Image (spheres, rainbow, N blue to C red):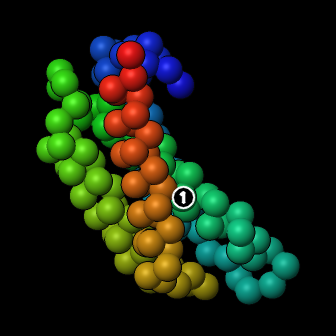
Amino acid sequence: MSKRGLNFLETHKIIPIILVILIASTIFYLSNKSYPVGPATPDFWKAKLYHASIFFLLTFFLLAVIKQGKLKPVHLLFALVLSFLYACLDELHQFFIPFRHSTFNDVMIDSIGIMFAVFFYTLLSYQE
């Protein structure tokens, strides 16, 4: 993604809004699925990569929705907190799903994706 692509997303807010809704819905849908123990259990590293990347995308597009004019620390903080809260709620939701469990480690992995999105978005925003 380039600065030009970022400007496009920020000017056409409906696109990142739709993407945020789709990503949040996908997270909820996949968290709602039961995975019985056995060969059908998702691969450990695939699951961790999914956690980091899906929350990277959620936060990145959320920033495109939130940003008004010049990127300010309050935009970054709001997106970071909102994404982190969604990660926590996602784990809480999994607690109530049969064969699923909530882990603090998953929230931390989600947070890595969230922080990378904030960092990457900031770099793109200040690119010449």
Compared with 93, 1 (above or below) is above
Could you say which is closer to the camera, residue 91 or residue 70? 70
Compared with 34, 20 (above or below) is above
The residue indicated by pointer 1 is 52
* Corner quadrant of residue 35: bottom right
Q: Is residue 85 left or right of residue 68?
A: right
Q: Residue at x 85, y 79 (%)?
A: 39
Q: Residue at x 74, y 86 (%)?
A: 37
Return the x and y of residue 118 as percentages of the image width and height: 36, 45
Q: Is residue 92 visible?
A: yes
Q: SS class of the residue under badge 1?
A: helix
Total labels: the figure holds 1
Q: Is residue 53 left or right of residue 22?
A: right
Compared with 122, 81 (above or below) is below
Q: Residue at x 22, y 31 (%)?
A: 71
Could you say which is closer to the camera, residue 127 or residue 1? 127
Q: Is residue 20 visible?
A: no
Return the x and y of residue 58 as percentages of the image width and height: 42, 46
The three-letter amino acid code for the residue at tag 1 is Ala
* Corner quadrant of residue 82: bottom left
